[in-house]
Amino acid sequence: MPARFARLRISGFKSFADPTTIDILPGLTGIIGPNGCGKSNVVDALRWAMGEASAKSLRGGEMEDVIFAGTMARAARNLAEVSITLTDTAGLAPVPFQNEPELQVSRKIERGSGSSYRINGREVRARDVATLFADLASGARNSAMISQGRVSALVNARPDERRALLEEAAGITGLHARRHEAELKLRAAEQNLLRADDLRAQQEARLAELRKQARQANRYRNISGLIRDAEAEYLAIERELAERRRRAARAQFAEAEAAVGHAEKLRDDVLGRETSQNDALPALRAREADTRTRLERARILAEQIDAEIARLEAARREAEARVATLRKDHAGAERIARDAEAAAIRLEAERSQLAADHELAPARIEQARREAEAASVALAQCEAATQQATEAAARTQAQRQAMETRLTQARGTAGQADRRAREAEAAHATAQAALVSPERLAAAEATREAAERAVAAAETTYAEAQNRVQGAETRRTEAHAAAIRARSAATEADAAAARLKAETDALKALLAQKFGRDPDPVLDRIKVPAGLETALGAALGAELSAGEQASAARHWRSLPAIASDAALPRIGETITAPDALRRALDHILLLPDGEDGEALQATLRPGQILVSIEGGVWRWDGFVVRPGAPTEAAVRLAQRNRLDQLDVEFARARQSAEATRAALQEAEAAERDARHAEEEARTARRAAESAIDRTRKDLRTTAETASRLAAEAERLAAREAAAAETRARIEAEAGEARAALAAIEAEFATLDDAQAFRDALDRARSALSESRRRDSEATQALQRLQTETDARARRLDTIIREQSDWAERARDANDRRTDLGARLREAEASLETLGADGGARERRAEAGAELEAAESDHHAAARDLASAEEAARRNSAAARAAEQDLARAREARIGAESAVREADHAWGTVAEKMLERLGVDPALPAVADPSPDAAEKARKRFERLTRERDEMGPVNLRADIEVGEIETRLAAIDRDREEITSAIAKLRGSIGHLNREGRERLSAVFTEIDRHFQALFTRMFGGGRAHLALTGSDDPLEAGLEIFAEPPGKKLATLSLLSGGEQALTALSLIFAVFRCNPAPLSVLDEVDAPLDDANVERFCRLLEDISQDTGTRFIVVTHHHHTMARMDRLYGVTMQERGISRVLSVDLGTAAAMVEPAGAIAAE
């Protein structure tokens, strides 16, 4: 058993909120603590980390219940983690950990995310963890995890349920499951055989139908071949036409490509000049950086000198404070020296006086002793005289005693009778006075009625408050809904404004791009009404990109207007444009809706252009442009108009957004007011509820008071009647007692007077008291003198010690005064030294001069650098202009390239169609007649053949394939039947083999377990005998396990007939017998010793020690038994010093014993 459990770490699991580590060491480890402190949580953590999947087995409702749920002082955790460290695991772990000597297996659960397992930090499956622990003869539900409940379950289990122990020891725990699985597979195979026969019959019927469909599919394919030929002819003609258009577009693209090359050459020349200027910048920047570095160094030096001056000043202030402190301490030392000198003088005087008094003490003590002895003799004489007088008085008193006793008894009886008579009269008067008056009863009833009215009023107030709360809730709900609507409206308004803003910014970015080569085209100064952008762009087109600068290669000149008598409206009448465009705009006529441009083209005068809103152009010289896509100028004009419209819409949207935000604020304020009103209404309702409770309580109190007064009135009336009767009876008894007293007093008067004897006794007693007083005073005087003498002796000793102490304090004070004087002189010298700054201020002046020079050099370098950068920026502007020219050339190339792409796309569409529909390479030789008429003729033939094929209706083109598939399937079915027949035979053989193997292994392990069980039973009970038996069936796989036990002094019986403790010992013997057959590296025993007495606990612990030594198993024992605790090698105490939070304390008993033994040996010596 090479693997070892080394430690357990718990964090956030159940009551273990903080990380806790428990070392699992060799031998016996005990876990102790009060009930409910979390001992069993340690066991649950171990089982959970080993893969326990049942929350119920962990005493929870769901798996997330194992996460620390929090306390009154601690917040709940979101995750729990438990890790187990294993050592000596090389070759036992799954891939890729098979060579690792140490493994850390951890399980973590997070709320809402489930559990995850890791081995050495790498995530693995739960099955891998379960397999790992199973290979180590451990696991969450392994027999080594023994609880008191498991022992009870074993005791109460049926014999067939106990068989699981044998199966686990034999390693055939899953035999029944595997055999059941094989039987299910056998039944499934037999069903598959029946289904295969049914399926073969179905496939043969389907095969006949498909052969008919295959003949119709052949005719369909023939027509499809003709259709393919017709379509190929049609697409070949279309391909040739597209090829011609593509060649024309490529020629135009080559011209644009040449223009781009020329522009790139000009751009490269400008960039070369820019590069040469930029090459000079690094040196200037380096110079500026050097001067800046020098400036920073000078500034830092100045700051350091300033800091040094400040430090010297602080040191000087500190030295002054130290000098003042030392002077104060020196004065204190001098004061202590003077106090010591005065105390020495005072103590010497007191010692002299006490010594003189101490010399006179023996004579005084002797005199007091003689006086005490004389007083003792006189006391003895007085005591004898008093004894004689006492005896004479006693004799006289004895005679009078009997009579006085009778007299006393009679007087007592008479007095008691009189007292009882007075008490009865007083009781009667009290009972009369205590009677409840009708007025008081009426007042109590009135108070109760007033309380009822108060309750009714409070209930009415509560109902009104409840109505106000409901109304406030309704208003708050409506206000909340209004706020949600307002918030939604505000969000929509903000989104609309954002969309308009984004569109505006995009249009501004587009319009910021240059149109044409001229830096200031006339297009940017034209205002066109919406709808006429396409018309104006079609009429003037690229001419709108020119400016009005006469120096430009292309520009507009201002010429006088030419009179025009055209009947059609002129476009210039509605357009705002520069004067240079006025003549051109006057000759652009707008075609009215519904008119024919071609009919009116012939009537145009030279220079006139007729345009339509859709972009059609009819020029006076016969040139025609059909309405189509707008030109770039038209698009730019439309964008400008859209931008103006967006400015208005954006302003309107922004106002709307502001209005909706204001409405939102009002709605939120209304919601807050409604919520505040609701809170006030709820407060009023709570007050009304309190008032109802208070008035109802008052009502109950007043009702109880009224009821109590009525009952009290009845009780007091009965008591008054009883008191009157008692008074009459006691008065009669008092009369009889007074008559008896008078007779006894007359008899007592005839006795002799004993006063003379009493007087003599009183005189003797007075003399005795005086003698005792004198004796006591003499004795006290003697004791007082002895006490004073002892006190003087003790005080003399104390004075000697005090003189020594004061002498020591005087020496210490003188030494301290000397030391403080020296330190004071040193501090004063240091203060004088700090008075000078050591030339720091001169160095500060030099640093300031250096700083000014560095600043001057840095300003000059920065100025040169700025000049060079400005020149570079100017050259960059020229480069950008060249880039813009290049961009325009590239735009032209892009237009040509777009035309090429369109032509290529048209050609590619035909080519793709040919490849897709026909699978023909589009690069085949050209057709003989690529005319449009030939294409139309080929298209009509293609359509006719297609209609003929469609009239055939649905056709199964896969009929031939399906015939082959079914024939193949029939062959496969035949093969499957053979395989199923073979599998059935194998499954039947496997079931038989499993049964034989299970019986053999179960029989073998039963014999071994029975042997261990008999030995362990005898050891646990200290005698007796027991054995195991298989009952209920001759087949070991179906038989139950019965336990027969014969404890010492009892007859052989089954487990159910034994006592509770005997059942527990027997069950533990069986469990450990199974454990002996298949030892585990770790065993957990959770309070299994609870039902055992001290003697059995002792045997149980010795057994654990032997198993641990023999097998190397490490035991964790949860216990409350003090004998078990004493036998542990170490103890972990689980406590709850903080409510709801478990903590672990550890004690190594072996180490503790080793520490105690040397201490005991020393004590014995």
Image (cartoon, grey):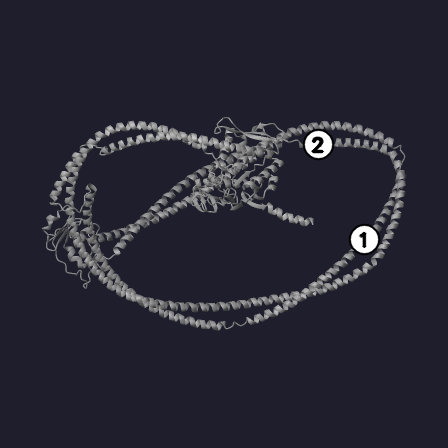
The residue lying at 41 percent from left, 46 percent from top is 669
SS for dot 1? helix
Amino acid type, residue under disc 2 in the picture:
Ala
Q: From mark 2 to mark 1, how far is it between C-alphas?
A: 64 Å
SS of the residue at dot 2?
helix
Q: Position of residue 1149 (x, y in %)?
A: 60, 45
User: Residue at 64% across / 30% down in the picture?
Assistant: 713
Considering depth in this image, is 394 or 1156 the residue closer to the camera? Answer: 1156
Tell me the number on the disc at residue 429: 2
- Contact, mark 2 vs mark 1 (Cβ under 8 Å): no
Viewer-proximal residue, 239 or 985? 985
Q: Percent from the top left, x then y, of residue 495? A: 33, 48
**Compared with residue 840, is residue 703 higher up or lower down, i.e. above or below?**
above
Q: Which residue lies under the disc numbered 1? A: 784
Please, what is the three-letter code of the amino acid marked with disc 1? Answer: Arg
Image-quadrant location for residue 718: top right
Q: Position of residue 844 (x, y in %)?
A: 47, 71
Q: 787 or 403, which lies in front? A: 787
Vertical comparison of 201 with 382: above or below: above
* Residue 699 in view (yes/no): no
Q: In the rendered image, which quarter is residue 34 located in? A: top right
